[in-house]
Image: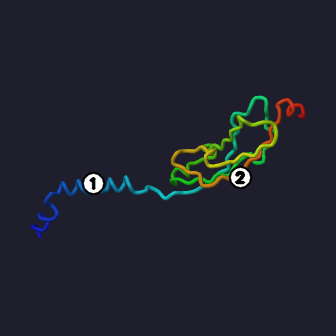
């Protein structure tokens, strides 16, 4: 029994321990640490670069429902203020405009991905600052 122990277990013992440590470290580095989770959050739509001579008269959807996927730990700690839906209005003119709301306009942490954005289109009515202001 003692020769078996010396021959198979104790022979090159430290090499065996080192290989076990390396294998465990490699497994921890490669194995996914968590199952992905999903959550849907209501996020306000932010309008960027509104021309100074224009004002937003009305919007069909002031907020969007954004479905996000990512590691469970990050999803659990996620708040609606961590996500931003931006619409670029720098080229807008007076009148009614429909903008696509896509995953590219949703800004969030790098470990998360956008699965779905509802609504996919937002209609904005733009008017002159003075024309909209005088009707109030």
Q: Is residue 43 above or below residue 91?
A: below
Q: Residue at x 56, y 49 (%)?
A: 77
Give me the disc on residue 21: 1
| Image position, residue 88 (x, y; %) | 68, 39
Given this view, does label 1 or label 2 mark the residue nearer the observer? 2
| Image position, residue 118 (x, y; %) | 69, 53
State left or right for residue 29 relative to residue 107: left
Label 1, label 2: how far apart the Cα atoms are? 50 Å
Secondary structure beneath dot 2 equals loop
Give 79 or 104, whichever is nearer the viewer.
104
Res. 99 image quadrant: top right
Q: Residues within 10 Å of mark 2 (few under 14, many from 20)?
A: some
Secondary structure beneath dot 1 equals helix
Where is the N terminus found, in terms of image quarters?
bottom left
- Identify residue for label 2: 119
Q: Total of numbered circles in the picture?
A: 2
Mark with earlier residue (1, 2): 1
Q: Residues within 10 Å of mark 1 (few under 14, many from 20)?
A: few
């Amino acid at each position: 029994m003692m020769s078996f122990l010396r021959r198979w277990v104790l022979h090159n013992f430290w090499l065996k321990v080192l290989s076990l440590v390396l294998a465990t470290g490699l497994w921890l580095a490669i194995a996914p640490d968590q199952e992905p989770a999903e959550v849907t959050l209501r996020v306000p739509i932010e309008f960027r670069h509104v021309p100074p001579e224009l004002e937003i008269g009305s919007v069909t959807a002031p907020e969007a429902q954004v479905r996000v996927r990512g590691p469970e730990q990050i999803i659990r700690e996620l708040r609606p203020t961590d996500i931003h839906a931006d619409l670029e209005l720098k080229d807008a003119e007076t009148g009614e405009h429909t903008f696509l709301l896509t995953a590219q306009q949703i800004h969030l942490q790098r470990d998360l991905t956008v699965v779905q954005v509802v609504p996919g289109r937002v209609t904005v009515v733009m008017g002159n600052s003075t024309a909209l202001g005088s009707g109030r």
